[in-house]
Amino acid sequence: MKHFTSALAFASIVSLVNGHGFVTNPKARQPGTAMQDACGAQVVSNQGSDKYGNIQGELQVASGQSDYQAAECDIWLCKGYKFDDNKDNVYSYKAGEKVDFTVDIRAPHTGVANVSVVDTSSNTVISSPLISWSDYASVATGVKADETSFSITMPDDLEDQCVTAGDCVLQWYWYAQSIDQTYESCIDFTLGGSGSSGGAAPVPSSKASSTSSATVAAPTTTAAPTVIVQPTTTVPAQPTTTFATSVRQSATSAGVSAPTTAPASPDTTDTADDALPFPTDSAADVLAWLQAMFGTLVGN
């Protein structure tokens, strides 16, 4: 019965997130291992089997997963799809260039939609939408031809904001208000630069490499003497002192005479005769000696 209930719950989740829209041209971001590291295995598995799903559905799947990291996933940006999984799929455009779009909508849901240039570092639209609809995929009229096949013109006011791959995306955004579901597809591009990751990625990589090697070299020369000297003077001494203190506290609680003999020798049983010589003067001295000897044995 428990397995049946779990299967039923899983089926309801699958039906909930079964998708309705995705950009098929230009090729949009796809799920991959970088997304899995941030959003969790179940979310990526869900999107791998159905890229047409909505963000609200993704969030419901993610809510029960321990490997979902909200900040790293950033699910409201490109549905959590990561640039690191799509470095070989970067388009190179020029200002004023016309770009043709094809969107596959599998079920109409009345809402609003647009295509915009989005700054991926802040998930904000740069300038104004390149095309927009105030009544998109309406259930009253059905999906119209110009909602799935259209063109946008690359803006000429981006300056140097989108010259590096991964900094910007063309984002198709559809919010189906009638059912409170959000759909997104993102196309990575550069403007006025190379459209391949091979041209854009090595520049920051080489800078990072030289910077990191310089950073490693500097601490090696300056920090090394501190690392060598500091542990030598403080680290060995501190555990010894702490350990000795704990031993003394234990011995003190066992008997009054223990601190006098315990520091002198760790094995009091072998040196008890040396520490307390046998008295021969009187019976009272013998009795006192026996009491002291007994106290020492009990203390150890």
Image (cartoon, rainbow, N blue to C red):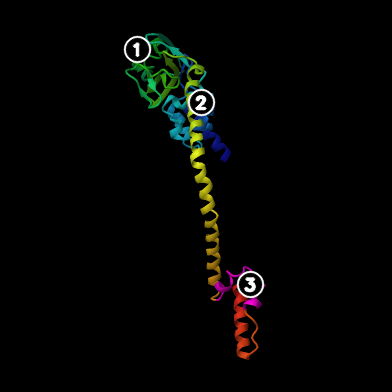
Badge 3: how crowded within 10 Å, few (<14), some, or many (20+)? some
Q: Is residue 272 within the magenta segment?
A: yes
Residue nearest the viewer, comparing 294 with 171: 294
Q: Which of marks 2 and 1 is nearer the N terminus?
A: 2
Q: Are marks 3 and 2 in contact (CB under 8 Å)?
A: no
Q: Where is residue 108 in the image (x, y as percent from the top left)?
A: 41, 18
2 relative position to 73: left or right: right
Q: What residue type is labelled 2?
A: Gln
Q: Label 2, on which residue?
A: 47
Q: Mark 3 points at which residue?
A: 268
The amino acid sitting under disc 1 is Asp
Q: Mark 1 or mark 3: name the one nearer the start of the chain.
A: 1
Estimate the x, y position of residue 80 in percent, counting from the top left: 46, 27
Residue 47 magenta? no
Question: What residue is shown at x 59% (from left), y 70% (from top)?
Answer: 264
* Residue visible at 51% across and 36% down in the picture: 67
Circle 1 is placed at which residue position?
A: 156
The spot of residue 14 in percent (x, y) is 51, 29
Identity of the residue drawn at 48% across and 17% down: 90
Part of the protein shown in magenta: 257-275
- The residues bearing labels 1 and 3 have C-alpha atoms spaced at a distance of 90 Å
Amino acid found under the numbered disc labelled 3: Thr
Q: Nearer the viewer, mark 2 or mark 1?
A: 1
